[in-house]
Image (cartoon, helix red, strand yellow):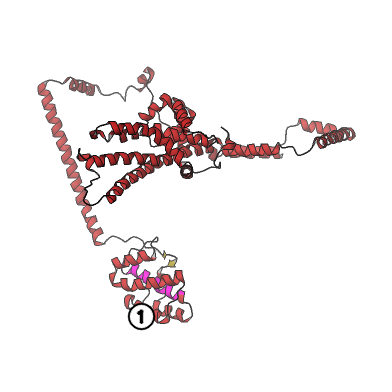
Amino acid sequence: MQLDRIAIALRPRSAWQATDLGFALARRWWLSLWLAWSVPAALVYVPLIVLLPGDYLWVPAIVAWWLKPVWDSVPIYLASQRLFGEQLSLRQAWRQSARLLGWSMLPWLLWRRFSPTRSADLPLTLLERLGGAARRRRIAQLHPGMGRVAAWHTIACVHFEWVLIIGAFGLVRLMLPDEIPFDATAFMTDEDDRLSAYLYSLASFLAMSLVAPAYTMGGFMLYVCRRVELEGWDIEIRFRALAARLGRPTAGPGTVAGLLVASVLGLVLAVGFAPQAALAQSASAAEQAPSADSPRAIAQARISAVLDGEEFKRKVERTTIKARTPGDADEAAGDDDAPDWLLRLLAWLAKGGDSGAGEGLATLLRVVMWLLAAIVVVYVATRLRLLRPLRERMAAGELAPAPRPDVLFGLTLRPDSLPQDVVATALAQWRADCPRAALALLYRGALADLMRRHQVPFESHHTEGECARLVDRFAPGCATFFSELTLVWQRLAYAHLVPGEALFERLCLQWQETFGNHAA
């Protein structure tokens, strides 16, 4: 595996980013990936749909769907080679993937067929050739960073397939004239309806083949990016580049030889002219261990402190099931053993008992079941009766309303932020050449009054348009004026269109008529 030839930028990515990268690769290599999946699938699908009688037209699509793991392996292998610069032909990809799979594909057609993480787990079988305990350990290592996203990736691709199938039926229905009857579901009930049966089979196959490149590449890049994270491929690439850069020659042979001679002469002179006491002191210092205040000791202490932190400790509890040995059975005996009377009763029931006792026991069990059913019905009825007053209070609005927001789209609605006379204050601000503040005051006062007196359920995430629709529903008497006020406010706030003085004075008059001359 030559990491320096990889076709993507190596860096840590989240699982969703890895899926997006897989979609990008699917768009880049879409034709070859689609052919790699479709050709072997068509070699099975086409003979089946041609040879099978009309009553079994659903079989080819089911067979092609069940063998999806086989078809998915070819695009994954082709992408794994192209990702590292190996250009394979489609014929080589088909041959190599068939050779690599062999009997290892059998589990994918049996108990692993419905695995939601198949797109990310299949590369383990195909590329790492792992099985048994080694595969389970590897999956336990890879799944914590990608398992949930791989499952959602599968769910999304299944929905994409159904969107294409339904779209194909809709397209055919639009193309047919009204005189020709067409029922998309007739093949389920009418055995003589061949058109919808053929269409369903063909649309299913085409939908699976069209979604396959995105499905396989999304799962494959989840697998690759998880390995990049665990094995540090990006760090290895950087170290290789650094080593290559440091290994380049920077001087000629003559320069190196001159530097070597100068270094040797300097060392000889330094040793020859050094005092003997200094030499002895240096030797004794070299023999001593580094002190606790040395930079090396301080760095080592800091490293140990970091490694002893909670961030580098991970405790995982796993519960496993294992077979009991005779010794374990002896230790576990006692409390876990079933009572002897229960064992005798079960043995008697297994033998059938005598006829009279058997009929009596059956009658007793029926009576017990009816009693349990009656108890459940009475309990449910009682609970519903107890909850009825609560539901009536909720319908009558007696319960405390939900808390209303203090701020809507940047406008403060707290009562203490509004003046006693909203209209008079707004007119004063308008005459002081502050049209935005004046109109904002009218709008804030209207919102606060609608929440307080009319109980309009504004929420902090609502927009101006949503607030206007809520007013139309909960306070229809104020809806006309509030809609006009909202429109004027939006033009000023977002388009910087200042209303005329006559319009503003009319809004103030209507505000006073609608909400009264008081603080909201």
Element marked by disc 1: helix
Q: Residue at x 41, y 80 (%)?
A: 424
Q: In which quadrant of the rendered image does the C terminus lie?
A: bottom left
The image quarter containing residue 515 is bottom left
Q: Residue at x 49, y 29 (%)?
A: 128
Decide which of 334, 416 is in the foreground and name it: 416
The image quarter containing residue 43 is top left
Work out whether residue 137 can be spotted: no
Q: Which residues are magenta?
A: 436-459
Rendered position, 279 above or below 332? below
Decide which of 214, 226 is in the foreground and name it: 214
Residue 53, horizontal then vertical, whole percent? 24, 32
Left-right relation of 387 to 20: left
Residue furthest out toward the left: 356
Q: What is the chief secondary structure element of the magenta stretch?
A: helix
Decide which of 233, 218 is in the foreground and name it: 218
The image quarter containing residue 198 is top left
Magenta stretch encompasses residue 455: yes
Q: In which quadrant of the rendered image does the N terminus lie?
A: top right
Callout 1 crowding tier (Cα within 10 Å): few <14, some 14–19, many ≥20:
few
Residue furthest out toward the right: 273
Q: In this figure, which residue is indicated by the disc labeled 1? A: 509
Work out whether residue 506 can be spotted: yes
Residue 295, horizontal then vertical, whole percent? 70, 40
Residue 48, horizontal then vertical, whole percent? 31, 31
Q: How many marks?
A: 1
